[in-house]
Amino acid sequence: MDENLKSQKVKDVLKVVAICAGVLVCVAAISFGMYEFFKARTQNNVQAVAQNGQANSENESQVEVIELIDPETLDEEELEGEENTEEAEEVEEENLSEEEKQKRAEEKKKKEEEQKKKQEEAKKAQSQGKPYWIKVNCAANTVTVYGKDGDGNYTVPVRAMVCSVGSSTPRSGVYHTPQKARWGTLIGPVWGQYCTRITGQILFHSVPYLRQNDPSSLEYWEYDRLGTQRSLGCIRLTVADAQWIYNNCPLGTSVEFYSNASNPGPLGKPGIQPVTAAGEPYRGWDPTDPNPNNPWKNKLKKEEEERKAREEAERKAEEERKAKEEAERKAEQERKAKEEAERKAEEAKKNEITIPNVIGKAESIAKNDLKDLNVTVKYSEDASKSNGVVLSQSINGGTKAKKGDKITITVNKITEISVPNVVGMSETAARNTLKDFVVTVKYAEDKNKRDGTVIQQSLKNGIKAKKGDSITITLNKINNSTEDNEGNNDENNEN
């Protein structure tokens, strides 16, 4: 019984194995058939493209293009030979001295620099006469187009493009465009606009379309993913960017591949207008397509007009806000200016005084009267006026002025002189001697003194007095002249 069960299980297993083997054979046969079919189709298409390019490379003919390419591989023997050579060099280098190693390193560096210089010269020679050099940053999915500087080198960035590369896109190297096509057939089959071949089956072209020559059949789900790795190997672009390359970059234009995820390029990485959410009929069109039937033209125009209207409204609102702020600022300035003027007027009113008249007053009294002013005193001499009195003032009495204003008063200052002795002199002689004084004469009688002479003076001889001071002299006036004469005669006789 057990042996029968075992035998049955073995038979079942063999049946399963046989079925699996049959399936694998069928799959292999189908795969081989498909491979042969696509291989033949690819070869025919490439030949047709090449023939068409040779006949008229500038003609906007329709070209069939296969996008999928296999990565390039090297023969195993070549790889093994390179590995053996590198290993031999490493073993040999280990046996060298430090000086020989350094010498070899310098020779290697010099050789690399010479090789780099030759490559640059080759690039320049190949691109001679071409206006632009195109660089594809595979890591950043960005294309930057460079123009020539004054020295003829491609250093001036002129246009940046968002793109989608693929796993089979070259990551390095410089190629030169050999062919263009207005519409090209891609794998799907799908179609692309403004195709420019770079190398082999690698092209610049638009995002694929579902129908040939129908710009309303865009693969919108792919368009919205521009800027990410989505193609099989070609460089997908917006229609506007693909058309720009198609129109402005002649055949033979250099296309350089490199990768730098952290820096998309000197002009950055442009964005796109998403189309999927826009619905029909917009999402079937590339918004950048210049086709006159593109519904995006009116939509974008309307959106642009609305955007400009919003910006204009915002600008006007901002201007109004600023004007309001400016008016408020001016009103505030005027209010403050008014308050300041009132404050100053109040201060001026508080500080305002009426200048008193101090002419004829003594200096000390005048200064006291002018205590709210900044008084400057100067002196002058006027014998006709009392000494020490104010002769004049720079601001007339009764004038309005501010506290602290300057005023100058002129005070009479008569020079002091010694009083001369005029006792015994006649009146005339005495007056001449006292010409600097105000002389007053009074009379007295002294029979012991000569008649008509000064017998006394109010200011003693030798004291200091001021010019113009008053002095009184007393003249002897004897009433009895005869007696006086007799007396005088007696005195003369006695003498």
Image: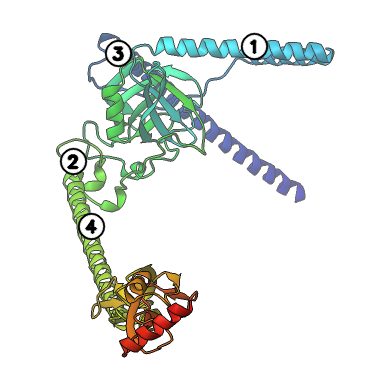
The residue wearing badge 4 is 315
Q: Earlier in the sequence, mark 2 or mark 3?
A: 3
Q: Which residue is mark 2?
A: 294
Spatial separation of the CA atoms under disc 3 and disc 1: 41 Å
Determine which quarter of the picture holds residue 48. top left
Q: Nearer the viewer, mark 1 or mark 2?
A: 1
Between 487 and 415, the one lying in front of the other is: 487
Above or below, comparing residue 299 to residue 157 in the picture: below
Disc 2 versus disc 4: distance between alpha carbons?
31 Å
Q: Residues within 10 Å of mark 3 (few under 14, many from 20)?
A: some
- Name which residue lies at 20% across and 59% down: 316
Mark 4–mark 3 Cα distance, whole angstroms, equals: 54 Å
What's the residue type where badge 3 is placed? Gly
The disc label shown at residue 110, or none: 1
Calculate the distance from the C-alpha at mark 1 to the C-alpha at mark 2: 57 Å
Nearer to us: label 3 or label 1: 1
Are discs 1 and 2 less than 8 Å apart at CB? no
Residue 457 visible, this orientation:
no
SS assignment at label 2: loop
Instruction: Identify residue type, mark 4.
Output: Arg
